[in-house]
Amino acid sequence: MKERILAFQHLSPEQTEQLTSMGVDVIPADQWDTARDISIVFGWSTEHGLAVLQDPHNNVHWIQTVSAGVDYLPLDWITAHDIQLTNASGAFSAAIAESTIGYLLYFLRDFNEAVKNQAGHFWQRPLRSEMATLASQKVVIYGTGSIGQHIAELLNGFGNYPFGVNRSGHGVSGFQGTVAMKDDADLVKDADIIINAMPATPSTVHYFNTDFFDKLNGTRVFVNVGRGKSVDEQALMHALLYQKVLNAGLDVFETEPLPKDSKLWDYPNVLITPHQTGFAGAENIRAIFGYFKDNLASWTQDGKLTVNLTDPSRGY
Amino acid sequence: MKERILAFQHLSPEQTEQLTSMGVDVIPADQWDTARDISIVFGWSTEHGLAVLQDPHNNVHWIQTVSAGVDYLPLDWITAHDIQLTNASGAFSAAIAESTIGYLLYFLRDFNEAVKNQAGHFWQRPLRSEMATLASQKVVIYGTGSIGQHIAELLNGFGNYPFGVNRSGHGVSGFQGTVAMKDDADLVKDADIIINAMPATPSTVHYFNTDFFDKLNGTRVFVNVGRGKSVDEQALMHALLYQKVLNAGLDVFETEPLPKDSKLWDYPNVLITPHQTGFAGAENIRAIFGYFKDNLASWTQDGKLTVNLTDPSRGY
């Protein structure tokens, strides 16, 4: 039987044509509730996705997300029903890594002060002694997957060889060393820069809490480009206030959009971007569609998914 | 006779000790007008420097600046009196190159909008289609000396191979191609990013003028980390208004400090930093002092200056 793909992700006529030429049916998002025999879902709808999976007329056995994180999907249901799940890990890594370097330079090169001074037409040179190059900083990256590796690679270009933290402490290329999460205390106590690039899983929720920040001693920049839930925002604000952390670049938040009354907006040493670090226009879409086609080709040939297969029970 | 160094540049006791152990006298800045027989000047004073050179009690034959640019020195006088001039080129290049990448990411990764939205507690995601990676941009760098080469090197780490523009069009490593200044029209007409890293010389004054900007067609980011005099600011503002240039990151200006009533301060797509891109605290000072010591060693040995000898008649 022909595979029938429900595309929650918008497809161009050319993309639809490419897929149908591979011998599959493509159903546009707006027919989600009338279509029958859906076997593959491309993209997701938080509103209708679960209903599509649960509809007895369908038989979904594979979901391809257009995001790297999969924490917003009904993972328990997906696990219980043996649905395979592939994500878009890698499609955003280059852009996220670039943004991360951007946050670091924004604070290290004193743009944060410059922007405020510019508003008041105020020519105020920073203290030369307070500035440093990125090359000279001790960087620790949490998460050594696609995003963490891309960040490390860019740092290497600056002559900076970061440390990595992951679950087991296994070595990863581009890092001068890696430790397991449980052994990070010695590593972070004199870190100049700490970057979170971990997925959201039960073991990373509020990993960056008061206990964590108490280990620090004036970390110059803390960056979160992983998931908002990994950071206890109250604890971070406390750490900023007590100079455990001097500056923070944040792209993800416990609640998104960040509520209008969040005190984070007004911290003078925090740069807030609205969950956009991965954006890179056509570059993202080209990559994701490429992953999907590669998977579809192997799936229709021998029932295997070769790109970005996740373990829904683990959440990444 | 012992060399006698007037140090307009502040020296630590350790640094003074290092110099005197090389067999020279070191005179602190505040004794500029009472000291006699000064033969070497380290650093500069716009107020008193020329008087020291002209004082018949002195016999200055070498000036070591603590800056890369030398355009603020009395170059005619220095040329006419055969004084050798070494600069600090290279001491700031790493920091300037990092700042330059910072300007590019600030605009490419949409921080400029984010900063403004943050002030209003406004969660506004940019259009994904309008964002791009630095890797994908066509970059043209004016000036392929120490600073230009450092910028190219960092760009290479992003998978970006820039074009260079210099006087003769001679090739330089790290660049995918170079052209002579007079042949730049074809190169810049579709440039995404243009960076000025040229010294201030008669041939670079107002190089970036209306004629130049008219060649462009929506250059995403124009960066000036060279000298302020290279850019006709009126022409730049006009280019910004008519979207020949979409954004600008400026560290140097025609008049510094940038006058309080300059209209540049209020351009929403301009980032102004107060001539600070080269700042990197102890890293700068270590490098400059190293150059000076290397030169002093060769000078006292055989009268030669080996590091960063400039041609005062050319201005770099």
Image (cartoon, coloured by chain):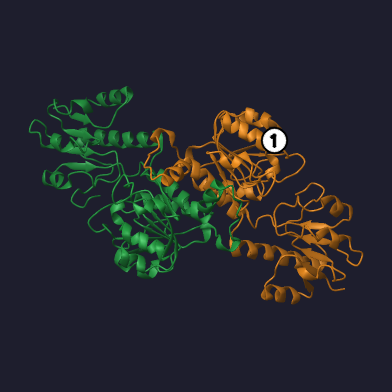
Chain colours: A green, B orange
Image coordinates for residue B78, horizontal then vertical, percent = 84, 54
In the picture shown, does residue B103 fall above or below B7? above
In the picture shown, does residue A179 fall above or below B137? below
Quarter assignment of residue B26: bottom right
Image mark 1: chain:
B
Quarter containing the N terminus of chain A: top left
Residue, disc 1: B181
Image coordinates for residue B53, horizontal then vertical, percent = 86, 61
Is A163 on the left or on the right of B277, as rendered? Answer: left
Is A28 on the left or on the right of A165, as rendered? Answer: left
Whether residue A25 is visible, yes or no, is no
Is B253 on the left or on the right of A77, as rendered? Answer: right
Q: Residues within 10 Å of mark 1 (few under 14, many from 20)?
A: some
Quarter assignment of residue A90: top left
Q: Nearer the viewer, residue B87 or B30?
A: B30
Q: Amino acid at mark 1?
A: Met
Image coordinates for residue B135, horizontal then vertical, percent = 48, 41
Quarter assignment of residue A202: bottom left
In this figure, what is the number of numbered marks? 1
- The secondary element bearing badge 1 is classed as helix
Pick out the residue farthest to the right: B56
In the picture shown, does residue A287 fall above or below A24? below
Q: Nearer the viewer, residue B247 or A76?
A: B247
Residue at the image position 61 percent from the left and 54 percent from the top: B278
Image coordinates for residue A203, horizontal then vertical, percent = 24, 59
